[in-house]
Amino acid sequence: MKGIWKGLIGLGTLLLGLALWIAGSIFEGIARGLAGESFLLTRSAMGIGFLLIFFGPIFFWIILPLKDRWYESHPKRFIAAITPFVLFLLLIFGVVISGIIHEPQLPTYSFNTTIEGDKIIVNINRITEGDLPDDLSIKLIDPDGEQVDFDYVSNSDLKDGKERVELNLAYFGAPKAGNHTLVIENVRDEVIYQKEVEIMPSKYNFSISILDDEVHLTIKRTEAGSIPDTLKVALDEKDTFSWWDAQEVSITDEKTLTLKPRYGIGGFSKEYLVKIKDIHGNVIFNKTVVLKPKSMKLGESIVVNDIRITPISAAYTEETEHSGWFGRTEAKEGYIFLVVEFRGKNVGNYKSSADIDDARLLTMKGYFYDPTTSPWFSLQPEEEEADYLTFEIPKDQKGVEIYFKIGKEERILQLQ
């Protein structure tokens, strides 16, 4: 009767172990499929099941029956015979169970990061395959702790052992200056790589020279930044400054820009601002400049619309037929006319026209006067004629400069 019970107990132990092994195997497969990793609980169940599968039959079907037969009559022989067998079984069990409950290892990697333009490039090389498939999460954190980009590399992406990942240094616009943090996590959400990437703008020197209505701005890069820098350069009126027509320039070494007012100066002189922003929107240069139209003298010419216009002479007179005041030839009492003769000639191949607009006279006392007549030319090719620019001013004053505009060209005619 005892033999039957030992046989049933051994069978029950075998079936229990088999059940644990099957259940552990099923849940282990589900865990690896869904979570991509193994769990200690399922591996432990498989290890206990394996132990029970062998322990039940060997102990209840072999060891106990041998003990009942030999131990009473030959105890020393029984112990001597059974000890090597038990040690061998324990060794086999230890090796197998350690392999079962051993935590599977994930692959190992090496990483190399570089900056190209406004992106950070991550080159991934898989060193060892590991026991389990692995997926990598790669994210980039800006200096304010905000995540600016993210990428996901699956196990299939690394089937050849290599992968290249590009992350933008900014979600929108220019990257922020400071330390960006690159973080790479495996399928277990373990951080397996972390690196600080410093982003700093380039540094520059600026110098300005002014030639009449032009600003010559020289920009020299003195220190290269982490990423290519695009500067925004603008010239506009001091009181109504706008970035609307700013130009973007990239400086690799040194560059000289010529800046001119958008709509002309519109007078003898005007204050302007030269401003420069870096890629982060910071104003890194701000300077006030005074611009004026190009100067010219009597006898010098300007060509507009194929009409060459030349101021010939300037004369003061109390009487002139070019006064423009309803045919009046005499200046009013206490006044005198300043008459500037202009000669126009068509140097083109078609009929063309040009007129002097927005003229203004500056006198020695600092007063300004508008003209009473302004020249206008409409000429056939090679045709030539004279017209007059006339001002009526007090007798005790003399003209110093005349501002005038022809089309988009502005000039200051020097009278003294």
Image: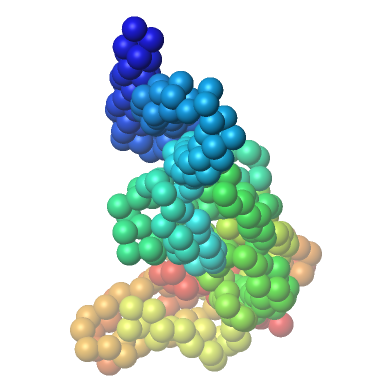
Q: Residue at x 27, y 78 (%)?
A: 352
Q: Is residue 203 left or right of residue 106?
A: right
Q: Position of residue 339 (x, y in %)?
A: 56, 75
Q: Position of residue 366 (x, y in %)?
A: 76, 63
- The front one of 251 and 262 is 251
The outermost residue toward the left is 350
Q: Residue at x 67, y 75 (%)?
A: 221
**Colouring rule applied to residues:** rainbow
Q: Residue at x 59, y 35 (%)?
A: 76
**Up-down: is 180 above or below 276?**
above
- The front one of 235 and 68 is 68
Q: Position of residue 46 (x, y in %)?
A: 40, 30
Q: Residue at x 50, y 59 (%)?
A: 109
The outermost residue toward the top is 1
**Up-down: is 327 above or below 147?**
below
One can see residue 413 in this view: no
Quadrant assignment for the N terminus: top left
- The front one of 51 and 160 is 51
> What is the tally of numbered marks visible in this picture?
0
Quadrant assignment for the C terminus: bottom right
Q: Is residue 18 left or right of residue 38?
A: left
Which quadrant of the figure has residue 258? bottom right
Which quadrant of the figure has residue 163? bottom left
Q: Position of residue 307 (x, y in %)?
A: 35, 83
**Up-down: is 10 above or below 359?**
above
One can see residue 300 in this view: yes
